[in-house]
Amino acid sequence: MANVAVIGAQWGDEGKGKIVDWLAERADVVVRFQGGHNAGHTLVIGGTTYKLSLLPSGIVRGTPSVIGNGVVLDPWALKAEVTRLREQGVEVTPDTLMIADNCALILPFHRDLDGLREDASGAGKIGTTRRGIGPAYEDKVGRRAIRVCDLAHLDDLDPQLDRLSAHHDALRAGFGEPPIDRAALLAELKEIAGFVLPYARPVWHMLNAARAAGKRILFEGAQGVLLDIDHGTYPFVTSSNTIAGTAAGGSGLGPSAVGFVLGIAKAYTTRVGSGPFPTELHDEIGTRLGERGHEFGTVTGRKRRCGWFDAVLVRQSVAVSGVTGIALTKLDVLDGFETVKICTGYRLNGETLDHFPAHAADQAAVEPVYEEVEGWSQSTAGARSWADLPAQAIKYIRRVEELIQCPVALVSTSPERDDTILVRDPFAD
């Protein structure tokens, strides 16, 4: 049986939460491998809505869930999320949640720096969530991060605090802020350490043992490929690699463990925050997509920008992430359109492109080339088999497959987990 990696094939918010929940019930372990609590997954189970930002989606069903070393962890956000879930009746224990002991921490001054830099950036703002994700990754790469394992050795932290202060105090002074209050920081870390440490362990060791035992491992990505630090719409991207290849490095398993790569894509396109968006619609059709799709960010609450399906971008995501199959979500939002458009290419300076250019100026200047297909008037909401879909909806799906050069493995037709058409079982490959 294959392990499965789930990634977003657009700009995030593709409906990964439902798909991961649907797969998590059949998995033995669920692993988050990158990002932080800037990601948002919404699960609807038995009429109850669960909003997750940091915890793997398997936690709601009691599936052993892992926060891998590729994640940056805000321990206070973790405590708040665990508390919220417990209030909803979900037990979170060291048997159901495991945190990599080599995970880098997001600290209060990371949040400060994130906001200060964004406020000072003027036209250069990139739409950060201001949660300290980027600065925490910077400290990790700069070899000055405080990690989960350091919470058990706080009396030995002075050399690391010297490195952090040397870097951050100069930045803070530039913004007119006082130096890091080391005593206050240590006091906060000592207070939160008792909550975090019971979950900490060498998860790479546990995951390799699970793999050797033939357990099914589900790798859960955050954000989407188009927000990848290398392959996304730079600089309007997140601070980590969101492609499927990161599942290996961010969990402590080798690349051969990843198996089936399931890319999640909406039947149209959305984006939160700043950055290029070739198929964005500023008319009543864009408004209709947003209203019918309830397009508001899980974490930020910001209204999502909406547009037609961009096959060029999804094809690019499929290529750089090695996607095996696509889960197409929110097909029902397109119900009732007389015609539906798909972007098949771009025009730039008189040339036709079959890929998205790397430079931000070119990305902002491209004009979408559309193919128009016949829509359908019947409802697809709640469909659970091909027989439940209108013929034109099936034709739309088949055309999407051709254009993105990847088969559709699942089709989601509502937020309810059972309203899913299974074409190809990722775990059976």
Image (cartoon, rainbow, N blue to C red):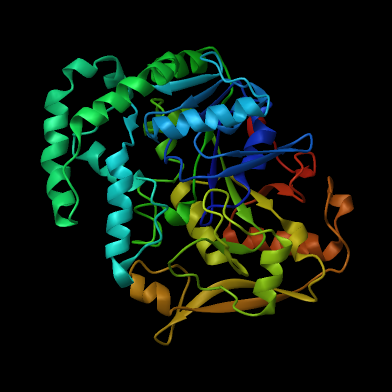
Horizontal side of 254 relative to 56 (left or right) equals left
Q: Is residue 218 visible?
A: no
Front in this rendered view, residue 284 or 340: 284
Residue 309 rendering spot, x and y as whole percentages: 62, 66
Residue 181 rendering spot, x and y as whole percentages: 20, 35
Residue 80 rendering spot, x and y as whole percentages: 50, 32
Q: Is residue 89 above or below residue 273?
A: above
Horizontal side of 398 relative to 55 (left or right) equals right
Front in this rendered view, residue 16 or 44: 44
Front in this rendered view, residue 155 or 239: 155
Horizontal side of 119 relative to 178 (left or right) equals right
Q: Which picture quadrant has residue 429?
A: top right
Q: Is residue 283 visible?
A: yes
Q: Is residue 416 above or below residue 319?
A: above
Extreme residue toward the bottom, this view: 350
Tell me the residue at 42%/38% (across/down).
34
> Which quarter of the rendering shows the N terminus?
top right
Tell me the residue at 42%/52% (across/down).
129
Front in this rendered view, residue 159 or 112: 112
Horizontal side of 140 relative to 128 (left or right) equals left
Q: Which picture quadrant has residue 62?
A: top right
Residue 175 rendering spot, x and y as whole percentages: 19, 56
